[in-house]
Each structure stands twice: as C-alpha cells, then as structure tokens.
Image (spheres, helix red, strand yellow):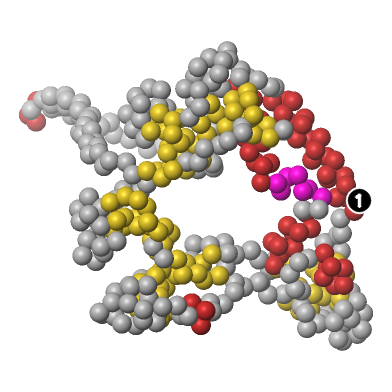
Amino acid sequence: MDRRFIPTALGRTVLELLIPFFDDFFETSYTARMEERLDEVEEGKISWRNALAEFDRTFTRDRDRALKQMVSGKAGIPLSEARGLLSFPIAPLISEACPHCGKKLKLRMGKNGLFVACSGYPSCTFTENIPDPEEDAVDVSELENTTCEECGSPMKLRQGRTGSTFLGCTAYPKCRSVVNVVMTAGRAEAKPDEPTGETCPESGHPLVRRHGRFGAYIACSGYPECKYKPPKPVRDTGVRCPRDGGVIAERRGRFRPFYGCVNYPACDFTLSARPVPQACPQCGNPYLLLRERKGGRVFACDRPGCGYEGPADEIPEMREVFLPATARTKPARAAPKRRAKPAAASRPPAEEIVTAPRPKKTPRRAVK
C-alpha cells in the first residue's frame, strides 16, 4: 500500500515477545557489528571460527533464558497476561472469560493471524479473530487548515490523475500553488518544496526538492513553464577516488549501502565502509574508514601494514551534489558470429548412383 510496509498483529506479537530475551540482536548497531566482523574475517584479521563462536555464545545464552522464561505461544497465552505483555489493544470489547461457557480465554496464533479462543476447546468452540492494526485515517480538516503562501487563499485537498494527493489553492487557475501530501509514520503530512541552493540551467529558477507519489525528487520551481529535471543527486562523502579523482558517493547495494566512484564502469573502485575525508596520522592515507567496534565508532586506516585506529569524535555529514550529465556512449555490440554450415559433400549425378537389389526373403519352414 503506497510503497509502505504495515506490520500485522501476528508480526507485532512475535516481535514484542522476542525483544525482552533477544534484545541484543534487535539493536540497530547489531547488523553493523556483524558486517564489521565479516569484513575482518575477509581481511584475515580474525578466524571465522572465532566469529561464529562469539555469536554462538550470545545466542545460546539468550535462547536458554527464553526457553525458561518466555510464555508459550503454542499452548496459548491467557488473555489477561497477553494484554499486559503487548503494547497494542487485543479485542478490547471482549472480557477475559468466555461468553459461552465462562472459562478463560487465550490468545493463539494461527496461519491466518491472531485469534482469541476458549481454553475449554474442544467442548467449547468460541473464537474471535483479531484484525490487523490499520494506519491512522487522514485528517482532512487538519490538512486543509492552511492558507496559500502565494496569494493567501485557503488550500483544499485534491487528488491527481495518477492517484497522488496534494493541497491545491482554491484560487486556481489564477494561482497554481500546490503542496504535496506524503505519509510519514502512518500519518498524512503536507510537505512544501524544499530549496536545494542550486539553479536551473535552463530557466534560472531555483531547483527545489518535491515529494511525489514515488518519493522525493528534484525539479525546477518554474514548473509548468520549465519542466527541467536534473539527474538524481548523489551523496558525496567528500573523498576523492585514489585512481581517477572522481567523487566517492554512497551507493545502494542489494543488501547494504556501499561507497564507490561515480565514474563507474570506467572506474570500479569501491569501499564497503564509509570513507571520511581525514588523512591518516600514521601513514598519510588521504582518507579513513568509519567502522563499528564494541566500544563504539572508530576511524580506521585500510592501507596494508598501517593498522591505525582512532576514536571517531566528529563525523562529517554527507551532502547531496548534482553531477554533470556526461554522455556515456555504449560500445557497439558486435554482431553475433554465425556458425558456418559444413560444406555438403558433392553428390554424384543421379545416373551414376547404382542401388543394389534387395535379397529376397526366404520363408521359414515350419518345425514339426
């Protein structure tokens, strides 16, 4: 729905039951620490057996604690206990006793989600499904309680042809001011255009960041007279490529972000950790890598034989920059080579072909 994930009641229940016992695995820094350990295994700094042993010790400790103290979802959680464990409401209109037989109700998990069932099953078959939590409804009155910044007329919630929602000025067509409406944390918010500090090369108007149906984008503020859209900006790390001097920008990989030269494919220089424009005090390397350690973030040098690591006091912010559009000519594809057909052997003329007569079949004699 609108390119967002909405958690189900079953998913929220499983998560809230696991966090008290596996809290270290649900930390935001856990994935970063694991990636750092895998990088150290790849670089040969630690053994893969030591990395797995470290994970196994933590997981075994949490698992044993969960086996002793966690409530059993398979046997069903008493409704009174479930309401104390979970943060979202569970069937608030139902009491803790079965309305049919008076026995206690339990929270159960099925393939179709959460449901409340009687503990007297199978003699009592009372059940009640628990619907998934929905997003907050769009408060139209709150959004429309704004005035146009250009002419002062009231704004009205409208919907475009593509299904996008926006606030449009009621003085249209004299005033064409619009403010896009986006969903943030399940709520509809009006987000005006944000200045970028850049100028449109075609019309001279400022370039602004707008929020559309498929996310944020950069466009000319002189739209619809000017329909210029620059290339998508990149997040510049401030470090230059040691091979060709290109910008080292943040890239989105399949599983995690990485950092590489913008002149790809001419230059394939990449880094798995974020580089920082700070020279190494030991070897003079023009950049350091931001890495996660047990004690916190550190600046580390990746030059072989250096091994420098220092505390990451101030981490510079990455800024968005527009790269000049370069015409990349794709190499012409070579025509596929066709396999030459083998030359057919010269056949003799028809009059020279002589066929031998077939021998006549002799009938078998019956055996008496």
Q: Which residue is outermost to the top?
A: 305
* Image quadrant assignment for residue 83: bottom right
The residue under label 1 is 68
Closer-to-camera residue (27/202): 202
Rendering coords of residue 295 (x, y %)? 72, 33
* Image quadrant assignment for residue 119: bottom right
* Image quadrant assignment for residue 75: bottom right
Rendering coords of residue 365 (x, y %)? 43, 37
Q: Is residue 283 visible?
A: yes
| 38 relative position to 108: left or right | left
Q: Which residue is outermost to the bottom?
A: 100
Q: Is residue 140 visible?
A: no
Closer-to-camera residue (106/323): 323
* Residue 311 falls inside the magenta stretch: no
Secondary-structure class at tag 1: helix
Rendering coords of residue 362 (x, y %)? 35, 34
Q: Which residue is drawn at the image coordinates 83% and 44% (left, top)?
A: 62
Q: Which residue is drawn at the image coordinates 66% and 71% (left, top)?
A: 132
> 287 above or below 71?
above
Q: Which residue is drawn at the image coordinates 46% and 70% (left, top)?
A: 190
Magenta residues, start to end: 21-27
> 334 above or below 104?
above
> 75 above or below 327?
below
Q: Which residue is drawn at the image coordinates 70% and 46% (left, top)?
A: 27
Disc 1 marks a residue whose amino acid type is Lys
How many numbered discs sit on the rendered protein?
A: 1
> 148 above or below 20?
below
